[in-house]
Image (cartoon, rainbow, N blue to C red):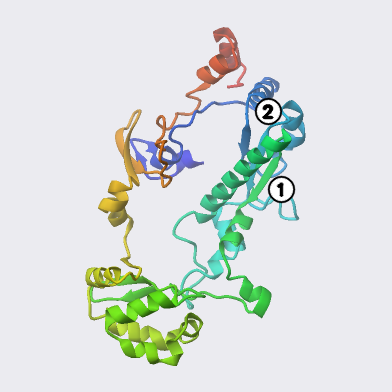
Amino acid sequence: DSRQFPPFKDGESLYYVNLNRGKRSITLNLKHEEGRRIFLELVKRSDVLLENFRPGTMDRLGLGYDVLKEVNPRLVFASISGFGQTGPYRTRPGYDIIGQAMGGLMSITGWPDSPPTRSGTAIGDILSALFCCIGILSALKVREQTGEGQAVDISLVDSVFASTENIPQKVFIEGEVPTRIGNRYEFVYPYGSFRTVDGWVILGIANDAIWRRFVEATGMPHLLDDERFSSNPLRVENHAELAPVIEGWTSTMTVPDVVALLTEHGVPACPVYNLKEAAEDPHIGGVREMTVEMEQPGLGRIKLMGNPIKMSETRPFPKGPAPGLGADNRYVLTELLGLSEAELEGLRREGVI
């Protein structure tokens, strides 16, 4: 699907290019007997298999986990689907927005009078991928002890629901249904956006020590004597009274001035960047290399998202560009599996690749 997602450059999806750098691509008809045979040969040589079909599809192809673990008992078989491999909804189709909706995230995102609001990014896809990676690494670690692989089952809905953090505790303990509260945080205050002369500033005053530093920086010592704001739980409870006090101060200053003053006093504060500003920031896009340039065949040198993982000994940079569809058929089938050129041509004629 991602090959059809914008933005495009010279007919090529940069969405696809950004997410598939450094991979290899083969085409293989799994409904063809010879395609399944080749697939099983690859499974014999693999540590991990990751599939994103609707539950039941791999079984119908004769390639479910029960079959593959007989071929390679050490295989870690990872699946990501909308609703998981078990349960009454298992066969339903699902995309990111389905996970966000049924995982509860859209019910707590946005402002009180706004309709259910999707996150600005495909957070369900991202979270399920991260949870899947953790599950795979855990299964590989267990394999070191047992010598055997296992199936890893990840659902978009589960992943989004898990990301709602401690907010469901209000349901479990208090019987209260959480609602949308804008940029305010349910458990900490002040922790959100505040208006300034020239825009909005974000404050993250997460504990009483930071609160005292904030009061000192802003020259409002009387707030320390106000019992309504003497602890974080009380500041959360009385946020409606505290908000205009804080915004009365921020609204007289510019964003850079607020950030500079509070940062000097050890109070977390920052501007609200758009993505262009984030990409061009000398710390984010520069030193931290969250924007990188690479050569993509047919497109030349293009700028893409960097890698947030920094390692002391290994540079986490793609080994190559995003592949074209089936670009690595010859390498995988001849170099890895030992097929001849004649056999490769035969597979093409038969529609296997």
SS of the residue under disc 1 = loop
Q: Nearer the viewer, residue 162 or 67?
A: 162
Which residue shows up at 44% across the image and 91% down it? 227
Q: Amino acid at mark 2?
A: Lys
Q: Horizontal placement of 80 versus 210: left or right? A: right
Which residue shows up at 30% across the image and 86% down it? 220
SS of the residue under disc 2 = loop
Q: Percent from the top left, x then y, of residue 349?
A: 59, 15
Which corner quadrant holds the C terminus? top right
Q: In the picture, residue 139 is in which quadrant?
A: top right
Q: Percent from the top left, x then y, of residue 312?
A: 40, 40
Q: Percent from the top left, x then y, of residue 348?
A: 57, 17
Q: Alpha-carbon neighbours of circle 1 within 10 Å: few (<14), some, or many (≥20)? A: some
Q: Nearer the viewer, residue 94 or 41?
A: 41
Q: Is residue 152 visible?
A: yes
Look at the picture and state if 299 lies above or below 306. Answer: above
Q: Alpha-carbon neighbours of circle 2 within 10 Å: few (<14), some, or many (≥20)? A: few
Mark 1 or mark 2, which has the lower sequence index? 2
Q: Nearer the viewer, residue 179 or 246?
A: 246
Q: Nearest to the eye among marks 1 and 2: give it.
A: 1
Mark carried by residue 31: 2
Q: In the picture, residue 151 is in which quadrant?
A: top right
Q: Horizontal placement of 310 versus 249: left or right? A: right
Mark carried by residue 85: 1
Q: Horizontal placement of 10 versus 17: left or right? A: left
Look at the picture and state if 71 lies above or below 106. Answer: above
Mark carried by residue 325: none
Q: Percent from the top left, x then y, of residue 322?
A: 43, 32
Q: Nearer the viewer, residue 118 or 321?
A: 321
Asked if the residues shown at circle 1 and circle 2 are in contact, with their CB atoms under 8 angstroms apart, the answer is: no
Q: CA distance from mark 1 to mark 2?
A: 22 Å
